Amino acid sequence: MRTIAVMLLVLASTAHAGTIQQDFDAAQALLDAGKAAEARDAFTALLKRFRDASRSRSANVVRLRLGTALAALGETEAAEPQLAAAAAALTQPADREEQAYARYRLAAIAESYGKIDSAARGYREVLDSGAMAADTPQGISLRAALARTLIWSAPDEARQLADALLALPPEKLAKGDTRALVESLRARIDLNNGRPYLARRRLLAAAGIAGGATTLRINAADMRVRGDLLIASHLTDNREEIAKFVAFSGAGYLLKAGLATPTDRNLPACAPLTTVATDAVAVIEFSIAETGKVYGVTPVYAAAGAGGRAAGDDTGPESVFVQAVRSWSWRADEAAKVEPFWRQVIRMEIRCQTGRGGFDPVDAAFYRAETEWYDRVGLVPAAAAGSSDAASLPVHLAELQAREKAHGTAAAELIPVLRVIGWNQAAAPDVQDQARRRRLALLKAAAAPAAAIGIVEIGLAIDPFYRSRNPADANMAELRRLVAHYDAAGETRLAMLARLRLAEVHLWERQRDTAAAVLADIVAAPETQLSAADPIRTAALLRRADVAAQQKDLATATAALAATGLTAAQCALVDVRPSPLNNSVTAKSFPQLALRYATSGAVGVGYDITADGRTTGVRTVWAMPPFLFDADTEAAIAKFRFTPMFRPGSSTGCTGSVQAVRFLTSK
């Protein structure tokens, strides 16, 4: 992208022409130096110097530079409208390069959103415009990007593009690690299309260009090439090399450096809810900002599995898994502890998840009551913000401050924002807790519906159980107090919800007789107070059936299960999980190869639970680093046992459980 030195003087305000030009040059220098945050602020200030919605060429050039800086910072939602405006306005022949660069950046944003096929079309349009010559840095980046996005849909064309880049004169690829990365891209095309041995040879050559595959020297290019070698080793079933390249890529250091697992690991559902087959797998690369926000998400390897690659744009596993990872967040206080170098190239192995998704139907009606109350009294919902909790947290914290300034710190107008902050999993626990308690106090002061108040009260009482599975006696006492309070107030559904949560804690503590008595109170409620189809009643009946069966009371168990009207797939409708009898992973499960290389890792293993309490369908659904800890962790979780569930005539108990396991070395 060429730098403009004169045109701004012609089209900007004459009163400040020199200052605008100087500011532009200074901002451009910051962008060229890789100081994206400073460049963003400088171009933002410069754009304000133009008239609102200015259509001048100069204003749109500034928009293009501002969008470029925002995209470099991972602020793609803010970058996209700036780049789109510039692309639409810069239509004169003299602006061909500027428009091409704007369209290139828009295609890159589409790629970061997981719209891989859409991005490929965007890159091809720029290529067809002829605005970026093949032997220029911009042209090389464009062709590499198009090849990268065609890996799965048009691998032959991707190979041709990569081969053409490698055929350029050596000096054209001499900058930094450009040749090594292009060699790695060419290998990645083979890696994803059934040629892992050929890919491995190319990757070793790329590593040699970058400085070696197993040296202690490491930069971002080394991390990527060695990470690709790790995948090649997996595909050629060489576990020794998997461990070696995990170690030499630095991937095994991340957890020791303090990187936790994400707060909200939302995985795509398996088919038929999506186009992703159960055996589809991907390795996704991304970066984590100091705020905990994920950016720079891209697929490295993706295999469609038995389901094949579904027809349609942006629906392949290479797209679906990227779209899932974009919504992940890390807690800002934990992400900030890790050096930026180690947060810039992170890779995870990912699969789809079976089982129920969406909001818990037991809680849904209570939260809906609060939203409906907002409409009645005119409270403005919190602003829609970002694609993840980490992206939205600073927006909502700023919105809270703005509402406090406008309405005061005790105003009902704060409630909708406090609600989303209290739910935000990227917020530190004390921030969440404070937001919930403030929201509860304001709901009471505003005489909100009992359902809106009660769901927060019950949530605060049960929260220690959900967070640590170790409730204090005080929390148990608070749940019992809430039961009595709601009964006295005639709030039957709230009383029953508090009873249900109390019974869950008793069951986790294996206090079956006490839990059974609490559940019996829920089931005994007349249908005029708690309908037969109420999710609270259904959840209580399912739990009661399980407890009665464990107590050898098959008559009660049979009647309770029949009363639900549900099939054996009940966990897809109501989240009923059995209590564990044995669900521990010991140090004996630490993979020996990982220990040999002093490698730490984290794994999420999905499984279903049979009616007799055994695990089945055990499969890794996410792992960091990829492919090293899977087999040993799966073997350990296959031995988990749970309290039996009463499901006569069916072996199915519950589906879609995920157990996270962390392995940390002391070295």
Image: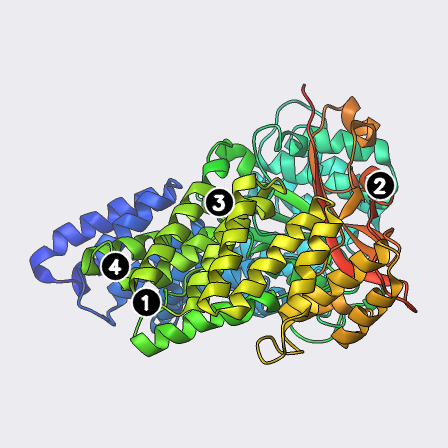
Of 239 and 452, the residue lying toward us: 452
Image marks 4 and 1: residues in contact by CB distance under 8 Å: no
- Could you tell me residue 206's position as x and y percent? 70, 38
Q: Tag 4 or tag 2, which sits nearer the N-term? A: 4
Q: Quadrant of residue 447?
A: bottom left
Residue at mark 4 to residue at mark 3: CA–CA distance:
25 Å
Q: In this view, does 317 lie to the left or right of 556?
A: left
Return the residue at label 1.
Answer: 447
Residue farthest to the bottom, as pictured? 528
- Could you tell me residue 83's position as x and y percent? 39, 64
Q: Tag 1 or tag 2, which sits nearer the N-term? A: 1
Badge number at residue 430: none
Q: Is residue 15 visible?
A: yes
Q: What secondary structure is found at the residue carrying circle 1?
A: loop
User: What's the residue type where badge 2 is placed?
Assistant: Ala
Looking at the rendered image, the disc whose residue lies closer to the viewer, 4 or 1, is: 1
Image marks 4 and 3: residues in contact by CB distance under 8 Å: no
Residue at mark 2 to residue at mark 4: CA–CA distance:
51 Å
Looking at the rendered image, the disc whose residue lies closer to the viewer, 4 or 3, is: 4
Residue at mark 3 to residue at mark 2: CA–CA distance:
29 Å
Badge number at residue 292: 3
